[in-house]
Image: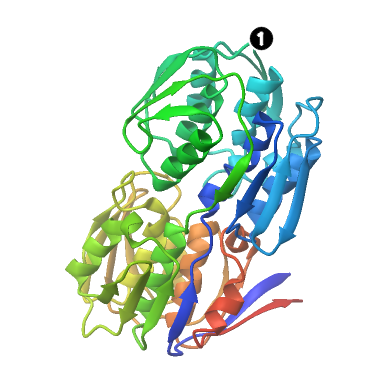
């Protein structure tokens, strides 16, 4: 059993660097299916989900060449395999991004329901993807928990997303690049990762307008070229580290290589709760605060308060003065981890599956815990760093899906954390 051992209550101080965005990195690998030329990737995070994306591309018969740390080269080698590895599909939800490129270039895709963690595995439907593909001329066949999609030629279409979805927006936008005719996508997600993906696609020959707005227009082209793609900094990682420093509140932490404008909703909240911070061009400085004041949040699609930062923020509120209402509007299961915080001594009342009330400040105590998902896992790390005594966190694969060398980077701030294998 691999786990983290954390001795909490230690001052955190120093510099920590943000790695490339997980949610941008995973979406670039399927693009290798859409061009015969090489795509070179830089600022690539070395995390478990990226390894799964690389393995998926190789399993489909294509090439992944790791040049050096943080850089890779991907290239299509054949069009024979249209079956997505069931083992890999069940490990990361972004595997569905391979479906559109397979349909656009091979006319067929076969796969089971995508997985990930308790937030994604089997609980997040893919109907919005299937509805979009059907609009684009795809035939969908479902048998038990498996799907077979076929299309003679992807055609342009007009599609309205009944709910805002980042991955569905990216999937249909990408697929439409090789469709016949024009595609108009409405009620699109607006995250920075979507804009970055569209900019890269345009650089290799796609014709996309409006990425980063609710309406995206794509004119299909016959082929795409190769190119170079530098992954943008991970805004969720930057926000998590900022919240971690605020919760520790014992030293100055400098978060480097980030894009502060990508998480402006967090800075607005920091102003209200009186966190002592300073934003610079590509860094954020978190200094000790005199008194953190409890404030409610409601998660919302970008540019609102990110659901992926809700779990860390909930931990911060255990150290704030007063009561705060945390309202999770995106995922049903995301607040279930608060029971683990209660075991550590937090004063948390669950009003319903979407809302909890946190009262603080409370002293947290080390416990033996199991990480339920990626973002809750990071929240437990933050709680353990702020807690008194030793905390053991198991199922750390879920955490390492999204955070590169977390132990090494936290040690650089003075944290007492070890990764051990019993």
Q: Secondary structure at mark 1?
A: loop
Q: Is residue 322 visible?
A: yes
- Count of picture labels: 1
Q: Which residue is drawn at the image coordinates 21% and 85% (left, top)?
A: 290
Residue at x 59%, y 41% (from the top left corner): 94
Near mark 1 (Cα within 10 A), the count class, few <14, some 14-19 or many ≥20, is some
Q: In the rendered image of this protein, does residue 88 appear above or below residue 9?
A: above
Image quadrant in which you'd find residue 412: bottom right
97, above or below 237, in the image? above
Is 251 located above or below residue 59 in the figure? below
Q: Quadrant of the C terminus?
A: bottom right
| Residue at x-position 66% and y-position 9% | 152
- Check the image and report above or below for 396 versus 275: above
Can you give x and y, in whole percent of width and height, for residue 71 in the image? 66, 57
Seen from the viewer's position, the closer of residues 183 and 36 is 36
The residue at which mark 1 appears reads as 152
Quarter of the image holding residue 188? top left
């Amino acid at each position: 059993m691999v786990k983290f051992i954390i001795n909490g209550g230690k001052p955190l101080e120093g510099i920590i660097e943000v790695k490339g965005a997980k949610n941008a990195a995973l979406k670039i690998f399927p693009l290798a299916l859409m061009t015969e030329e090489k795509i070179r990737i830089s600022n690539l995070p070395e995390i478990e989900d990226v390894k799964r994306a690389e393995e998926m591309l190789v399993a489909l018969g294509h090439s992944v060449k790791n040049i050096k740390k943080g850089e890779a080269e991907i290239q299509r080698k054949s069009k024979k395999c249209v079956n997505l590895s069931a083992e890999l599909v069940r490990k990361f939800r972004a595997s569905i991004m391979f479906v559109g490129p397979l349909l656009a270039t091979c006319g067929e895709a076969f796969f089971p329901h995508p997985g990930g963690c308790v937030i994604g595995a089997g609980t997040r439907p893919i109907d919005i993807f299937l509805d979009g593909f059907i609009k684009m001329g795809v035939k969908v066949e479902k048998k038990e928990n498996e799907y077979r999609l076929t299309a003679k030629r992807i055609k342009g279409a007009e599609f309205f997303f009944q709910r805002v979805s980042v991955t569905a927006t990216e999937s249909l936008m990408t697929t439409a690049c090789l469709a016949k005719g024009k595609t108009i996508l409405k009620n699109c997600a607006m995250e920075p990762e979507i804009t970055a993906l569209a900019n890269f696609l345009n650089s290799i020959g796609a014709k996309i307008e409006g990425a980063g707005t609710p309406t995206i227009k794509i004119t299909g082209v016959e082929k795409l070229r190769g190119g170079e793609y530098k992954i943008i900094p991970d805004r969720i990682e930057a926000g998590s580290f900022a919240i971690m420093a605020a919760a520790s509140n014992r030293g100055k932490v400098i978060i480097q290589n980030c894009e502060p404008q990508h998480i402006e909703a967090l800075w607005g909240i920091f102003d209200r709760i009186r966190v002592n911070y300073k934003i610079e061009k590509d860094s954020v400085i978190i200094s000790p605060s005199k008194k953190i004041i409890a404030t409610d949040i409601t998660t919302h699609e970008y540019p609102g308060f990110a659901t992926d930062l809700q779990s860390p923020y909930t931990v911060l509120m255990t150290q704030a003065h007063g009561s705060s209402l945390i309202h999770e509007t995106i995922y049903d299961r995301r607040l279930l981890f608060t029971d683990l915080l209660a075991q550590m001594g937090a004063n948390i009342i669950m009003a319903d599956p979407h809302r909890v009330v946190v009262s603080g400040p409370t002293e947290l105590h080390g416990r033996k815990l199991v990480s339920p998902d990626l973002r809750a896992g990071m929240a437990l790390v933050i709680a353990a760093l702020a807690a008194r005594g030793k905390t053991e966190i198991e199922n750390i694969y879920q955490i390492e899906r999204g955070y590169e060398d977390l132990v090494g980077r936290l040690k650089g701030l003075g944290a007492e954390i070890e990764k051990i294998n019993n």
